[in-house]
Amino acid sequence: MLKGLKHRLYPTDSQKELIAKHIGCSRFVYNLALETKNTAYLGSKHNFSPFDLIKQLPNLKKECEWLKEVNSQSLQQSIQNMDIAFKKFFKGAGFPKYKSKHKGKQSFSIPQNVLVEDNKLVIPKFKKGIEIVLHREIKGTIKSATISVTPTGKYFVSILVDTNIENPIKVPIKEETTIGIDLGIKDFAVTSKGEVFENPKNLKKAQSKLKYTQRKYSKNKGKRTKKRLALIHEKVVNKRKDFLHKVSTKLIRENQTIALETLVVSNMVKNHNLAQAINDVSWSTFVTMLEYKADWYGKNILRIGTFAPSSKTCSCCGYINKELTLKDRSWTCPKCNSVLDRDVNASINIKSFALKNNLSGEHTLKNHNELPTLVGVMTYEALSPLGKG
Ligand SMILES: [Zn+2]
């Protein structure tokens, strides 16, 4: 099982300088590799593999001697990361962007030779080690690390560890231990049991402060306002992550199976009224958290498509209410007279759609980590002499 944990770093001034060099050189190589790949493709339809580009690094170093000051594995990894961005693009993500010194994450990767000893992070080119604060002992084999610096000047390292423990076997999927979740804008999440997770108030307050400072900064680009803006932004991001961690851990601990709708966020963001709200509640981060925590604890996540009419279907009788608008918080089913809370009704539907889907397909897999076999997918009818076979 791979686990990533983030720790605070306290580099010395000279180490800060060397970290800045690593970030700068990694960005430089990333952008150059992206440019080369694009040009080759547009010009001659040639598709450079990361290996083709890595082979060119020694020649590049002859031209740009300063690249020799940094860990060459970090530069190689930069090219690999560019290629990963392309693979994500072919799976539907945005086209890979050039990295900027002023925008986006400021980081570099250390793909191997990462060591933590005596509260020091020891990596190539940093032989004396960088002071690290561990809130938990690292158990397992360290695979790789990424060092980043925030706009407010804080240093962090994300360490990827192989715990050498297999993921627990998934618990069986049963109707009575499954919940459905409807992710929303008014409330963050509502479950089929009627549990409501509101968006935290302290987050809203911090966000309005952020908006105010952003407006101030756009009028007068002062250095002090910029620093303040970065600090408030960091606070908002941290509070949001904290909230998402709390809710996802609670749901995974208390339930065996969680059914969710696959949300196409990019479609909804086009609607400007919703854009901010969707951004705020960070559904995709939340779903990612649920998925990896489910793997850690041997729980199940079931997904259904976005187009299942989860809000409009009566969860009692199946009647579809075509007139339902976003404003309607509750409605009465004209067919069976049930009074339905919009979000609870949706989450009950998500649960039953997901269970139905699951029963029609994956139920033959006892362990979802296993691939189906010919014997495993055979039905009992086929085994019986009276069956169709
Ligand atoms: Zn009904």
Image (tube, helix red, strand yellow):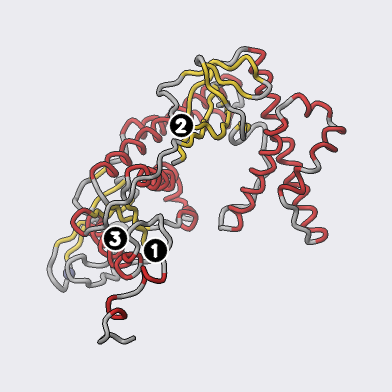
The percent coordinates of residue 154 (x first, y second) are 54, 21
The percent coordinates of residue 354 (x first, y second) are 31, 62
Quadrant in which the N terminus is drawn: top left
Question: Which amino acid type is marked by label 2?
Answer: Gly
Single out the residue that lies furthest toward the right: 63
Nearest to N terminus: mark 3 or mark 1 = 1
Answer with the quarter of the image where residue 55 lies. top right
Nearest to N terminus: mark 1 or mark 2 = 2
Q: Is residue 315 above or below residue 34?
A: below
Picture disc at residue 305: 1
The percent coordinates of residue 361 (x first, y second) are 35, 68
Question: Which amino acid type is marked by label 3?
Answer: Ile
* Frontmost residue, 279 versus 74: 74
As measured in the structure, the alpha-carbon distance from the residue carrying label 3 to the one carrying label 1 is 10 Å
Element at label 3: helix
Element at label 1: loop
Residue contact between numbered discs 2 and 3, judged by CB atoms under 8 Å: no
As measured in the structure, the alpha-carbon distance from the residue carrying label 1 to the one carrying label 2 is 37 Å
Q: Residue at x 50, y 32 (%)?
A: 141
Element at label 2: loop
**Looking at the image, is mark 2 or mark 3 nearer the viewer?**
2
* Frontmost residue, 156 versus 205: 156
Residue position for label 2: 140
